[in-house]
Amino acid sequence: MALAEREHILEVIDTLANRHLQGKVRAVRLAIIALLSGGHILLEDIPGLGKTTLALALARVLGLSFGRIQCTSDLLPSDITGLSIYRREDQRFEFLPGPIFHNLVLVDEISRAMPKTQSALLEAMEERRVTIEGVTHSLPEPFLVIATQNPVEQIGTFALPESQLDRFSLCTGIGYPPAAVEKAIIRGGSVREQIGQIKPLLSQSQILAARGALREVHLGEKVAEYIHALAEASRTHPAILAGVSTRGAITLADTARAAAYLEGRAFVAPEDVRQVAVAALAHRLILRPEHENRRKEDVLRLLLKELPVPRD
Amino acid sequence: MRLESLVHWLGAAIALCGYLALAPHLGGPALLLFPLLLGLALAAGKFSRPAPPAWALNLAALAVFLVYVPQLSRTHLQPAADILVLLLGLRLLTTRSPRQRLQIYALAVLALAASTLFDLSPRFALFLVLLFFAVALSLVLLTVLREVPQLRLRRSELRALLGTGLLMPALALPLAALLFFILPRTQVPLWDVLNQQDQAQVGYTERVQPGAAAAIHGGNATALRVETVELAPEDLYWRGTVLNQFDGQSWFRQTPPHVPAEQPVSRTERRLTQRVFPEPGAHQVIFALDAPLLVQGVVTQVSADRVFTGRQRAGQRISYEAISLPGATLQAGATGPNRDFYLQLPPALPEDLRRLAAQIYGEATDAEERLARLRAFFAEGGFRYTTSDLPTGEDSLRRFLVEERSGHCEFFASGFAVLLRLGGIPARLVGGYYGGDYNPLGGYYLVGERRAHAWVEVWREERGWERIDPSVYAINHATALRPGATGGWRHGLRLAGDALEHFWAVSLLNFDLERQTRALREARRVLRDFRFERPGSAVWALLLLVAAGAALPWRKRFARRGADPYLRGFLRLARRRLRLRRIPPELGLFDLAARLDDPAARRFAQLYGEYLYGDQPLDGARKRQLRALLEQMRTNQRNSRR
């Protein structure tokens, strides 16, 4: 079975990760996985590591329409979804779509928005449509939200509740670039300007074709068992209060399909599951109070290490 | 495949097994009718014809009873076998409810059991094993069929079902083996015990009567099997009894004068140990290679002229060990034998014979000289060995010696001994067997009844009783008495078959109460001491069987794990090349392939992953590829080491 458009997608990752976003292979890859599996991604890291740059570059190279929402505490739901205004000359209301009506939406510092705004956004992400004044407007396809969050800043933020975190299929940090890369960046300065010149490498229809191919990726009995065993292990682990939900397991399966697709396989291997497991599951865990100072990622890595891979 | 037709075929096979087990003992009509009924049943099943009405079949069964039951008697059990087989055949024709199928199975097992009334041969074991598995499997399938009558099975499902069905009887085997050691058994067909009848004696007899019949027909019956090393043909005289009196017509045995007892003395001191397995028969003589020194393992009486007789119940299977000194003579103490006893001749001996003796011996008076002349007479007299056109009647011996000069061993031995006695030399006849077919597979001699033989023992002053076989003087001796070596696959097959029968008789039929208790004692001793001091082979066999039975359920798990020797090969290679003591459980195939950094390994992971995770079939082509990739990996590894 041919994996449609895989070459192009790999080329995109290659271009982004090696030319424009050096040292961010993992984040780029995960963002693509989120895009292909129809999910959204939350980038959680301190400011200045290139979260926004990543989103911009991705939008450019994918040739998608790009919307950006800078969250502040006075951001209103309608600032995201759009609103109807009255046209006096035509004597009717006209709908002005908000920034969410783009293929790729960057929601910067999502935790600064008020809970009401946050939930409007998350609802749109989940439903893929927006209802304003009784009229339902579908969001474009593909539709990918890249949200960023600053994990250390506490003042004036509204941390996303766990139930809302669940709406993001993947959550990952970016991390500091390797020393050599960082030095080069210091010498060369910001790459923001370059990004404006990136030529789109993919068309919208190509992305949709790739997503279609993803549905053909086979997920066998053994791998399904493996995913279930992982979810089960998260529910019984002593450090974890609430483990992975069924939706989490479904997301893991979907994103693992995308990972397998990127590996060029027509079936999901346990390695694909392991590749995305931390990004797909860690943010869904609720640790017990006595273990709250542990990192969720570390707990999940521990689970992965203890779980034998189905090999026979 | 439809499960119902599978059960149908199995039922037919089971019935056929029962029939074949009994077939050699059936009367003609039953022998012919059963295949007919079976064919009808199979045809009806194939073309889904309705079964004949029940009343017709019941009537037929009644008719069978009416025909055969009157023929039944205590000594004539064959009609019972006929009834059994015909009922089985009729049962096959009826509509097939599970109940009727069970009746078929039961009748077939009964038929097998009935066959033991007539004979106990390895065939029984064959059919027992076949029926054991077939019936157990059928019972499993029958329960499935009851639940889902219209079940159709795919090939893989069928294989799984058959596997489970056969596993159960296989698991029961160790228990069955245990029963073998415990249950009492009979060594001869049950009917023979209940109904001891005189069987026509062919071959060896206790009376040598030349001239009793115009021809002798050697049967194919087995007389003895003797486990020993391969011997020279001139040593193969199986000594039985000594006939020391002649009445003009026949030689017979009288208890010899008791003193002095004879002892075998050999110049070479070569001792030969044999284990002898005589077929059950009526006679009580214990056969051993000439000259017998000792017989062990059976209660025997030995007479002064070294004739061993065993006190065996008629028809019982025995075996014993004999030690012989081949080429030895029997020495009779200082005084020598009772000359009058061994020179006895009937007064009414034909005058021609006395004249012949005088003619042969002439003026020679010395016993050795006379013996030499007699030998020369036989060697040069143009005697022929034959088993047909024999002289018969009262003066048959005279006609043999004087006129026709053709006869079989009894004539040769009788004539030689009579002439010796006429010459004043003590002589006697020995009855036994000569020769045998060596079976290299079983390491034993097969001695048939047609090898029954008679020869002469002559008293020589300096040496004692010496064996002389006058038959060797026949001009056609080499072809008549020593059948040429028969080769070819048929001969080989017969030898193999006989070796199997021998093994069957030795290890199964002869496994009597004494050995059962011995085996139990051995087992107890082994378990108590747990020192491996050569426990009986039976105990080892038991332990082995139990172990094998216990291992069976594991085998399946092993088999499932072993379905992918390729994966194991891959993991082994990976472990070696990555220098890991064991592969961490969280490392998958692709992880390993990436670490190995070998294109062959990557390709292997891809291919095997397609089977394992992609649910692609592991077909022949894929297996070949996997094997080739493993080979490639090995080569790469060797190259990288250099």
Image (cartoon, coloured by chain):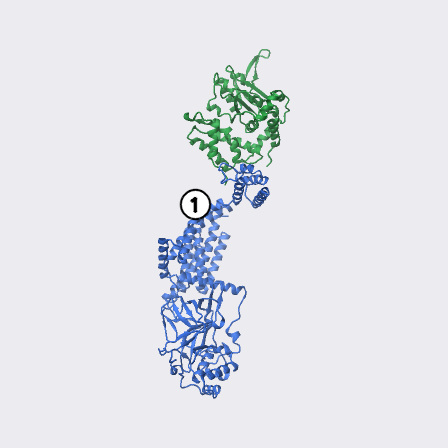
> B172 or B530, which lies in front?
B530
Residue B537: quadrant of the picture: bottom left
Callout 1: chain = B
Q: Amino acid at mark 1?
A: Glu
Position of residue B435 measured from the top left corner of the image (x, y, whole percent): 48, 71
Rate crowding at label 1 as few (under 14), some (14 to 19) or many (20 or more) other CA atoms within 10 Å: few
Report the chain shown in blue: B
Instruction: Evaluate whether residue A11 shows in this view.
Output: yes
Position of residue B220 measured from the top left corner of the image (x, y, whole percent): 47, 69
The residue where tag 1 is placed is B147
> B163 or B9, which lies in front?
B163
- Compared to residue B512, the image places residue A96 above or below, namely above
Residue B606 is left or right of residue A242, and the answer is right
Position of residue A16 measured from the top left corner of the image (x, y, whole percent): 60, 26
Could you tell me which secondary element the residue under label 1 belongs to?
Answer: helix
> A120 or A253, which lies in front?
A253
Report the chain shown in green: A
> B221 or B158, which lies in front?
B221
- Compared to residue B545, the image places residue B231 above or below, namely below
Residue B71: quadrant of the picture: bottom left
- Compared to residue B587, the image places residue A193 above or below, namely above
Q: Number of labelled discs?
A: 1
Residue B168 is left or right of residue B623, and the answer is left
